[in-house]
Image (cartoon, rainbow, N blue to C red):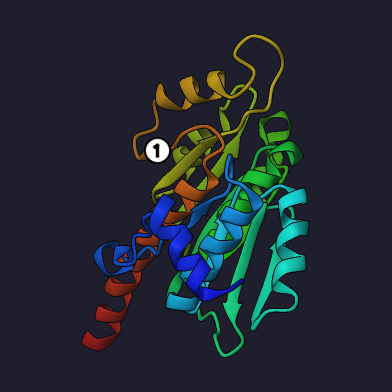
Amino acid sequence: MKKKNIKSYLKNFICIDAEREKRNNIPEFIFAENKSSAMVEELLYSIAESNGWSAATRVSSSVADYLAGRFKSSSFKFRWEKEARVFVVYKKSFSFKKKYPCPVGIISAGSSDIYIAEEARVVCSLLGCQTVTYYDVGVAGLHRLAEPLDVMLKKNVCAVIVVAGMDGVLPTIVKSLMPLPVIGVPSSCGYGWRGRGEAALNTMLQSCSPGLLVVNIDNGFGAAVAAVLIAKSASREYNSGRRKR
């Protein structure tokens, strides 16, 4: 991993958006799917060299093994969030900080949806937002929702990400019970016709609970970014209120 080679490789094939965080408070993440292991490695290296850290989503186990072997002998630390499929690289002097006092709630309908919920959790954490998570509390056993929603309200979450496959009803129910934004994530989990997330997406888009926002199928990353921006806005209001008092 020579810096000179990385610059040449990036110049020829990839244009890194180095100013993205200054524009919208969200740094560039690497979408690893359909990229070669070497390309993901060099992108991680280049962004971490510039920003202090970098992360790639949708990283397969084989690519993660390759990256671990490459970064093990480098000047960077790394961690592989297997459930979330997120690979994180950071300088040894870098520390991830909690920036916002308002946490984000994350719920998954079933255990098959956990990898999407975990992607959302890890991205929230990397961007400085704490999370409150409850998994496998779907509508097949609706009584399981009572405790998670009660805890999240008590902890003053500013938004709730709800991941659901099959019929995709859970986000609508959660929004009907929560006085704050809910972000629905349809997951590609289900049987047969429209069972790869399309039915869940349609259900969420046709929700009769106002205030439910919907991202695309399996997009835990997009849901996390939206939730973090909500947390940032809520934290600004929270801090302003504290100053007034």
Q: Is residue 184 above or below residue 239?
A: above
Please report the residue visible at 75 percent of the width from the left and 41 percent of the height from the top. 111
Q: Is residue 203 above or below residue 94?
A: above
Horizontal and vertical percent for residue 28?
Answer: 41, 60
Number of residue marks? 1
Residue 67 position, x and y percent, is 70, 62
Q: Position of residue 168 (x, y in %)?
A: 57, 27
Q: Quadrant of residue 1?
A: bottom right
Q: Is residue 118 left or right of residue 228?
A: right
Kind of residue indicated by mark 1: Leu
Identify the residue at horizontal 73%, vertical 34% (top origin).
141
Badge 1 density bin: few <14, some 14–19, many ≥20, Cα 10 Å: many
The image quadrant that residue 206 belongs to is: top left
Residue at x-position 70% and y-position 45%: 114
Viewer can see residue 22:
yes
Q: Is residue 55 left or right of residue 113?
A: left
- For the C terminus, the image quarter is bottom left
Against 185, is 161 above or below? below
Which residue does the numbered mark 1 point to in the structure image?
Answer: 212
Q: Position of residue 85 (x, y in %)?
A: 67, 52
The answer to whether one can see residue 130 in this image is: no
